[in-house]
Amino acid sequence: MNSRHAALLHNAPHSHMPADTWARLCCEQALLAVEDGCYGVGAVLVTGAQELLCSARNQVFADGHYNSAGHAEMLLLDQLENEHPAQDRSALSLYVSLQPCLMCYGRILLAGITCVRYLARDKPGGFINKHLPAAWTELSARTCVRQADADPYWINLAEQAINHLQDRQALRQRVVAAWHGQPPE
Ligand SMILES: [Zn+2]
């Protein structure tokens, strides 16, 4: 991790909120995603015994081509399903630095995750559970998605990672280029 990003983690206040440990790890992953040239979003899965099970970060451009499913939550749930198939999902909590999008919200429901806590709100892109088809409404009733009880420092850092520590416009242009079959620069 570069020194500027490491300082942002280092300068954090001492942990005093329940979710601060996981918020820090989400922000660390988000900053690493920025350094990978991807969207600054990170996520972790935590067991009911408050142990870290998996961590992941956005990797949409990491392999030299555009992977539209490379969101942090998607890769996190791939890890869960590939590496921990015997894990009971009912007590797991998913922490993520940014409010989940439409795709990830659906995946979270299908993966059987019932507790989701995000740091930064995503007003333009965060999915709000409204007007779902009946089967999805039923599925979504099992799952609670809300902002984490974390120190404002982490919520602010998560917001910085996605909105200010990278050129979001340039990332958007890379996505559009990929839609036209052009490789990421
Ligand atoms: Zn997503």
Image: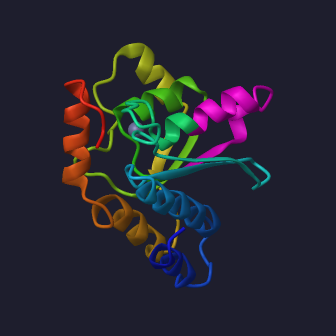
- Using the image as rendered, state which of residue 40 and residue 137 is in the foreground: 40
Side of 54 relative to 8 (left or right):
right
- Indicate the position of residue 90 as horizontal and vertical percent values: 69, 35
Compared to 50, does 89 lie above or below? above
Q: How many marks?
A: 0
- Indicate the position of residue 149 as horizontal and vertical percent values: 52, 65
Residue 100 seen in the figure: yes
Residue 141 seen in the figure: no
- Using the image as rendered, state which of residue 128 and residue 166 is in the foreground: 166
Residue drawn where x is 75% and y is 26% of the image: 85
Q: Quadrant of the C terminus?
A: top left
Q: Quadrant of the N terminus?
A: bottom right
Part of the protein shown in magenta: 76-95
The part of the image, by quadrant, that contains residue 156 is: bottom left
Side of 69 relative to 149 (left or right):
left
The part of the image, by quadrant, that contains residue 23 is: bottom right
Residue drawn where x is 60% and y is 30% of the image: 78
Let me know if residue 132 is in the magenta part: no
Ligand 1 positioned in quadrant: top left
Residue drawn where x is 19% and y is 34% of the image: 176
- Indicate the position of residue 66 as horizontal and vertical percent values: 36, 33
Let me know if residue 91 is in the magenta part: yes
- Using the image as rendered, state which of residue 91 and residue 167 is in the foreground: 167
How is the structure coloured here? Answer: rainbow
Compared to 126, does 52 lie above or below? below
- Indicate the position of residue 33 as horizontal and vertical percent values: 46, 54
